[in-house]
Amino acid sequence: MEKETAEDVKEAVERDFQMHCRVAETDALMAKLLPVPDSVITKVLKKMEVNCCYVAGKWKAFPSPNAAQKEEEVYKAFISVANAIREAAEEVMKEEGSSHERLGANEWVDYHSRTPISQDTDGAPIRPDALLALLALLGLKQQVEKMESARAKKQESKATTSKLAVWWLQIVAVVEMKRSNTEDWKDLVKQLIGYLRRILREQLDRRFVFGFTLGPSQLNVWMHDRSGVLGTAKSINIHKDPSNFIRLISAFVVLSPDKLGFDPDIKLYLSPGIVIPSYRLDSDREAYSTNPYDTKWVIKFSNGKEYLTVKTLSIARAGIMRGRGTLTWVVVPYRPGLSSAASQASRSPQQDTNSTLELLREAPQIFVLKQTWRPLDSTSEDYYHQFAKGPESNFVGAIRHWEDVKINGEKDDTGKLIRQSLDANPPPTAAGSKRNRDENQEPHLHVYCTDENEIGSFWVEHAREPVFRIRTRILLSTYGWPLKYFSTLRELLRVLRGAIQGHKDLYVNGVLHRDISPGNILIEWNPGAKITPAKSSGRLIDLDHAKDGRKVEDRRSNTDQILDSDDLHIAALSIASEFKKNTKVPPGQFRIQEDVILRAFEVYPSSIRCQVYVVDAIQHALNFNHHPGDGTWSCMTLNWKQIVEKLYEFESDEREHGSLRTGTPPYTSGEILSDTSYFTHEKVYHDAVHDLESFFWVLVQICLTRKGPGGERREELTVDLKDVSAIDNERYQQLRIVVWCVFESDFGRLRDNKEHIFRASEIFERYILSNLHSYFDPLKPLMSEWFNLLRLAHTHRGLEYRAVHDRVLAILDGVLGSEDSELDVLNEAGLQVLKTREQDSMYSSDHAKHKQSDH
């Protein structure tokens, strides 16, 4: 996970708050999302009256809105009443003999003066006012007090802190309270959402989470899932409507864990044969590692098969407010007696490494398990994998199993199962009134307050429809390392080539990837194969954003128009005459065969534009020393002969219907970022050339920002400029500006800068190629040719555009087929990469020693 500050949390919530925060009718939300039986609510209320907790239409512990002087008075009152309701609900469940699975013992705690300790050391130090915590955590209350005392005396120890590392992991729900409208209630909701987001970030077995805002009398409930946040439109007056207050608090006693956002099919691995849901953990278990990447889980698929996570690859997206929330692990088939190694999780980095190696040596097979919340109306990734049927279709990640996750037999989606198909349309401003809707206006959350300056109700103006999502799990039999862990330049190019071949295998069968990024290009490891640069290959993974196309029989636009022989002859002579003046034309005869003109005429019916296209195509070939030995230019010499005519169209109106652009912006073509052509500003649709441009930007980003193998950033991008000479300062600043302009600036600037680079090609040579790290200097000719090929394709949208895979693969093959020794240099960083990959590949110590002797 990346380092996160409190300001980061605030910015993240603010960014998504308006567009993804909605409200629903209060009684409907309470009844559907918190379905506590009315009989239980009635019995609990009766007990509250008997115990004098609820007297004369008021919760006795709560001060009146005007009487409360300090927020602490509200904290104390809530904790007292909430725990009384919790205990009464537990009594009712015991009396009724309920036997269904419920949360472990829990308690409401006032924690407003302390910051919860995070398992994630990069997490921001934020704290809710009150929370519902499992008693496994509450056994640490005395340690909390001791730690605070030690802090005051500046005697705090790391041992004391580490014992509290499970705090956020045990929080079930959070509360944010205010005495009155001392600050904007909207900001209070944003604070609460920040806490809910944090729980999702840290609790990987949570699907959604509840929280609520509370004043001396008014309460609002909020539920955070992967489609955003849904809250009660009208506040609940806890004194006048005690039943809904009891419903909320009793829900955490009465409802099954899946109704409270937990996944019953993801359990903590404690020791061989002992796995337990996190919500049933007792205080004697030390289940979580100090590093969230080392915690081990057992995950059950709907077919009954279980897999043990032995290594976490990515959980960085777990805490996003809405979206896919993708998690990935390395897993092995789980057997109760698999190994005692997993139970040694995370007592030290070396122990963690050893236990993981032990597990993987014992495992019959290794997989990558990916969990993601895909849009409900999107096509599954498994569907697209079946189209990777090229002649050598070993370049796309292979799927062993795929499923939409089910909870109690129902698909786990945010619309139907989690939100229970609630109508979340904003309520009218007044009875019978209608609100004008301007589609161009941004959503805005409004808050109405009561006479006591508490929240009375919410409504969202210009609300947008939420993107409902369904949770999907994919088991991949492909395992390897991210592209940045290349060991030599030749390996870098070979892995890129493999991923591009995989892209072509999909494309020629009607699937377009649409999200090329470094994380989706894998250096594949084949179990049992020796780890050497010569043995590696590349695979393309992650088809989350893929799209299938519409097959067309022939994309040639002018086959119905025929040039006569005189026109062909004149055009050929005109172009030849132009090039005889060019000093780059080799000595001897210069001829253009008529098939070149005919082929170009398919792109441009105008004879003038047709000739311009032929001139540009030949000039490109000459610039990079691709010229015929006998001076005769034909379709064969221009690589126009084998253009595939039966392709697929990927045109659609997705954007017009509100879908977001696909791709990772730093690597996305500027044409896709703007929806328009670089050169004509006509509307464009995502096609193969745009993904091949993304592959190009991936390579550029590595060469600009990295020192070489292993992914370490260049010193010029990390050092304090005050510590360098004036000459270096200027050079470092130029590099930083280039990196910012092309990869790190905002969406609009990325789009404009990429267009500017393609329209004024000298910018690429002057600012990008000249700023590559010296390690990558041998790749400059290749990158220049690749860039200019893309520019030719974008300019004319002609035959290079149609055959962009073959043209780029030919460029890579030309370099890979050379005997350039600089491509095979294995420097110290490259050796370290191979060592790391060898450790990851779980080789025996004897093999490791043998490998070292080879070096």
Image (cartoon, grey):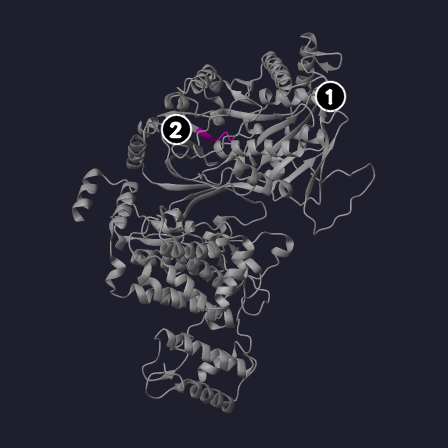
Q: Which residue is drawn at 52% across and 17% down?
A: 105
Q: Give the range drawn in magenta.
A: 263-267
Asked if the residue at tag 2 contacts the one at tag 1, i.e. Cβ–Cβ closer than 8 Å, the answer is no
Is 56 in front, or is 385?
56
Mark 1 or mark 2: whose residue is earlier in sequence: 1
Q: Which residue is drawn at 49% across and 36% down?
A: 5
Occupied quadrant, residue 243? top right
Outermost residue toward the bottom? 566
Judged by its main secondary structure, the magenta piece is: loop
Q: Position of residue 448 (x, y in %)?
A: 74, 33
Q: Name the residue under label 2.
A: 289
Q: Between residues 499 and 761, which one lies in front from this camera angle?
A: 761
Q: Is mark 1 on a helix, strand or loop?
A: loop
228 versus 40 height, above or below: below
Identify the residue position indicated by label 1 in the image.
Answer: 241
Q: How far apart are the two marked residues, 1 and 2, measured between alpha carbons?
A: 43 Å
Residue count near mark 1 (Cα–Cα under 10 Å), binned few <14, some 14–19, many ≥20: some
- Which residue is rendered at x = 48% and y = 48% of the image? 382
Against 509, residue 362 (above or below) is above
Residue 428 x/y as whole percent: 78, 39
* Amino acid type at image mark 1: Asp
Give the image location of residue 723, x and y in percent. Answer: 36, 47
- Between 645 and 235, the one lying in front of the other is 235
Residue 298 location, quadrant: top left
Residue located 54% across and 25% down the image: 172
Q: Which of 18 and 381 is in front in this view?
A: 18
User: Taking 243 as reference, is 612 above or below it?
Assistant: below
Q: Is residue 618 magenta?
A: no
- Give the side of residue 484 with respect to residue 652, left or right: left
